[in-house]
Structure formats: C-alpha cells, structure tokens
Amino acid sequence: MNWIQFPVIALISTIFWVTGAIALGFENKGPIFKNLGIVLTMAGIAVFGTFLAMLWIALDRPPMRTLGETRLWYTFFIATIGFITYLRWKYFLFHLLCVLFALLFLFLNYIHPEVHEKALMPALQSPWFAPHVIVYILSYSLLGGSCLIALLGIYFIYKEKSPEKYLDLADNLVYMGFALLTLGLLFGALWAKEAWGHYWTWDPKETWAFLTWLTYLLYMHYRHYHPNRYKTHLWVLSLAFVVLLICWFGINYLPSAQNSIHVYGG
C-alpha cells in the first residue's frame, strides 16, 4: 500500500467517522444508535491504522520523515483520543470536535500530496527516530485535544455556563500530553547525542520545543495556584497550542531555521 491509495482510505475513514458521530449524536434515541456509532468509529480508526501500518511496510521505514507523514499520525491519534474520551467520560461534543479536527488534517494531506521516498538520511536511521516522533505526535494530539476543549470552554463562558467540567478534562489531557512531551525531549536529546555528539545545540526546533514545554508547565502551575480563574486558564491553554504549532511546522517558515536539521523534508 502506498500514497496512491490515500484518497480512498481518507474517504472511507471520513464516511465511517462522520456517520459514527451522527449515530452517537442520536444515542438518546436508543442503544442501537450508540452501538452503531461505536462500531463505525472503531471501523474508521481501524482502517486508518491499517493504512499507516501498510505504508510503514511498503516504505520499509517509519512513515514519519515528512510533514505530511506526521499529519497522518496526528489524524489517527486525535480521532482515537476523541473516541476513547467519549467511551470513558461521555463527552460527545469533544469527540465531535476531534472528528472534525481529524478530517481537517486529512484534507490538508489530500491537497498537499507528497513524494514518499524509502531512503532515510543517516541520522534518521537511529533507533530513537520512531519512538521520538511517535511520542511527540501523540503528545501533540493530546495537547491539541486540550486546545479544542479550551475553545469549547470559552464558548460556554460567553454563554454564561460553567466550563469547570471541561477544564477538568483538559487538565487530564494536558498532564498526559506534558508527560509525553517531556519524554519526547529526552528521547530527542539522546538521539542528538548519538547522531551529532551533542545533547542540545539550541537549534530553532529545539528552542521552540523547550518554549512549548515551558508554556504548558506555566499553564499547569497557574491552574494549580489560581484554580478559579477559568477564563484565563482557557485562553492560556488556547494560546499554548499556537506555540506548539510553531514548534511543529511553523519553524519551516522562519529564516533562522532554513539550515536546521529539524526542518521537515518534502
């Protein structure tokens, strides 16, 4: 399986996820709708996960070298996180937002097709490559989910409703995402030491990764010491994701990063 099959896989996944979300939206009409929604959503996740696995086999390398390949993983993780969150806490609105977010990334990959070469530069042949990228993208997915909840919470504040239950869910996602973000930084440092002889060089990507880590650390401390300032928490959480996006792919457009070893290949 290769990139030629992506539009078909994207269409099938979209149909499963959208119809699954619609069915779950009618779960109060009877258990058949809930069960149908769960089955359809799981089918979409299974189809997309299988595509990733087959792409890995076809390329004979982890499909994580290009920006588009990381978007594939983000699509898979954000859809899965939304679904698991629905099963655990019954937050249908969050699940729906995660589905829409996953579809957005599918669309971005559809309009920006890439050439997927089998070759990897020597530095990317490290055993740290796949764990580093997977941990980071999973972290980005969890933190992206917390941003979706923050936006939902801001909406509820302006509707004069309490966003407290949404902040509790956002906190759970931030704690997990931050832990994985920390692990990703450590994996990256070990990889850098093996590949280039230095744990840290203040490369633009490394600098923005550290800024992202500090931003979420700031959020957690502010949330702890000022637990009732809901509006400020939600805005900080929303803006933190902007820093994350700059770290992920925004540095590709920074003049200072043009010679960076961390700029994604096409």
Image: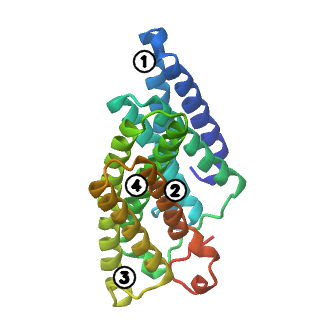
Badge 1 vs badge 4, beta-carbon distance below 8 Å: no
Look at 45% across and 62% down and name the residue there: 62
Identify whether 211 is placed above or below 77: below
Instruction: Tell me the tag on residue 35.
Output: 1
Which type of secondary structure does the marked residue at label 2 adopt? helix
Packing grade of label 2 (10 A; few <14, some 14-19, many >=20) is some
Q: CA distance from mark 1 to mark 3?
A: 47 Å
Is residue 109 placed above or below 20 in the rendered structure? below
- The type of residue carrying mark 1 is Asn
> On the image, numbered disc 2 is attached to which residue?
58
Q: Is tag 3's residue or tag 2's residue first in the polypeptide sequence?
A: 2
Question: From the viewer's perspective, is 31 left or right of 44?
Answer: left
Tell me which numbered mark, 4 or 3, is placed earlier along the sequence: 4
Colouring of the image: rainbow
Could you tell whether 241 is left or right of 136 in the image?
Answer: right
Residues at marks 4 and 3 touching, judged by CB atoms closer than 8 Å: no
**Mark 4 against mark 3, which lies toward the viewer?**
4
**Of helix, strand and loop, which one carries label 1?**
helix
Residue 126: image quadrant is bottom left
Residue 112 at x, y percent in the picture:
69, 58
- Give the residue pinned by disc 4: 138
Mark 3 crowd level (few <14, some 14–19, many ≥20, 10 Å Cα):
some
Residue 167 is tagged as: none
Calculate the distance from the C-alpha at mark 1 to the C-alpha at mark 2.
Answer: 34 Å
Residue that appears at 32% across and 32% down:
88
- What type is the residue that disc 3 sits on? Ala
Nearer the observer, 116 or 246: 246
**Which of label 1 and label 2 is nearer to you?**
1
Q: Which mark is residue 192?
A: 3
